[in-house]
């Protein structure tokens, strides 16, 4: 049985607002009404003998669990509209825009979802680090505080103040994507034990090359307590955010079995060491 889809902070909605509208507001980039049957939770049932792990309502993990997906069979496309050359590594495509520029790559897609979640809760909580180490908050940015890069220096600058709309969020995030990446994101997160992996965690190797994969959901076997996870990524060049297919164990579909004692966790296009799992502070 599916849980109720996430709702944004009550202050943003009137009591008369319908459940469908609440869910749409939780995913404000959508251009069509949110449909629970098209969500991640509806598309991917847990493996046999497993139940989804309990998550607090309003948490990042709960929000990720109900992400909207594009119709089954949708291909992954690059930011240019061209097909991703490798179409065998995805099980679904998340219904979220990539943007026309080569910006929303792997770490950027993780930042995008985290930023969208926080926007649905309280826009004042949105802030991300640049590769330089500077932290840029969305509330400060819409208030008129921005930055400019001169050579190796990041200097404070001013811009016109504006309302904290979703359009403003997208422009802010594109700026973050330009000056952040796996290195800054890895530094911003804290280490987590593979045995405790949960939705919202990030498998990440900072650097160049580096990569980041987001944990969208988790289930646990009732008898063995073994965890299974759904993973998502963007890649280079910027492309549709997609749910990964388990190509090593195709019988699991999109679920990946977690072995806490393993040294590596293999995903279709990247191998992560067990100490590269991180969590938002």
Image (tube, helix red, strand yellow):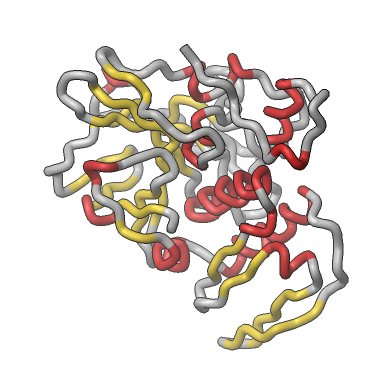
**Residue 103 drawn above or below residue 40:** below
Please state which of residues 259 and 53 is positioned toward the viewer in this rendering: 53
Residue 215 at x, y percent in the picture: 40, 40
Residue 208 at least partly seen: no
Please state which of residues 55 and 69 is positioned toward the viewer in this rendering: 55
Residue 68 appears left or right of 187: right
**Residue depicted at 44% across the width and 25% down the height:** 91
**Residue 235 drawn above or below residue 25:** below
Residue 37 at x, y percent in the picture: 59, 14
Residue 229 at least partly seen: yes
**Residue depicted at 80% across the width and 72% down the height:** 144
**Residue depicted at 38% across the width and 63% down the height:** 206
Residue 262 appears left or right of 66: left
Residue 157 at x, y percent in the picture: 75, 82
**Residue 65 drawn above or below residue 144:** above
**Residue 15 drawn above or below residue 141:** above
Residue 159 appears left or right of 76: right
Residue 222 at x, y percent in the picture: 23, 19
């Amino acid at each position: 049985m599916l849980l109720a889809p996430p709702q944004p902070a009550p202050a943003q909605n009137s009591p008369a607002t319908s459940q469908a509208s609440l869910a749409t507001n939780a995913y404000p980039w959508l251009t069509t009404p949110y449909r629970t049957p098209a969500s991640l939770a509806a598309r991917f049932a847990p493996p046999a003998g497993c139940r989804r792990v309990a998550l607090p309502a309003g948490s990042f993990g709960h929000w990720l669990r109900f992400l909207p997906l594009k119709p089954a069979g949708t291909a992954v496309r690059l930011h240019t509209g061209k097909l991703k050359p490798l179409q065998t590594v995805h099980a679904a495509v998340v219904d979220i825009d990539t943007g026309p520029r080569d910006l929303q790559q792997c770490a950027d897609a993780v930042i995008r979802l985290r930023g969208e979640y926080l926007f649905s809760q309280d826009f004042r909580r949105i802030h991300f680090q640049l590769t330089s180490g500077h932290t840029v908050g969305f509330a400060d940015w819409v208030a008129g505080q921005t930055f400019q890069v001169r050579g190796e220096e990041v200097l404070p600058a001013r811009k016109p103040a504006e309302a904290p709309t979703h359009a403003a969020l997208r422009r802010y995030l594109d700026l973050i994507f330009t000056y952040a990446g796996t290195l800054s994101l890895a530094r911003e997160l804290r280490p987590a034990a593979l045995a405790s992996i949960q939705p919202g965690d990030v498998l990440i190797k900072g650097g160049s090359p580096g990569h980041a994969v987001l944990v969208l959901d988790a289930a646990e076997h009732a008898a063995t307590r073994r965890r299974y996870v759904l993973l998502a990524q963007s890649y280079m060049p910027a492309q549709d955010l997609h749910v990964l297919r388990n190509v090593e164990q195709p019988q699991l579909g999109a679920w990946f079995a977690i072995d806490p004692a393993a040294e590596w966790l293999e995903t279709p296009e990247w191998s992560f060491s067990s100490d590269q799992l991180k969590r938002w502070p």
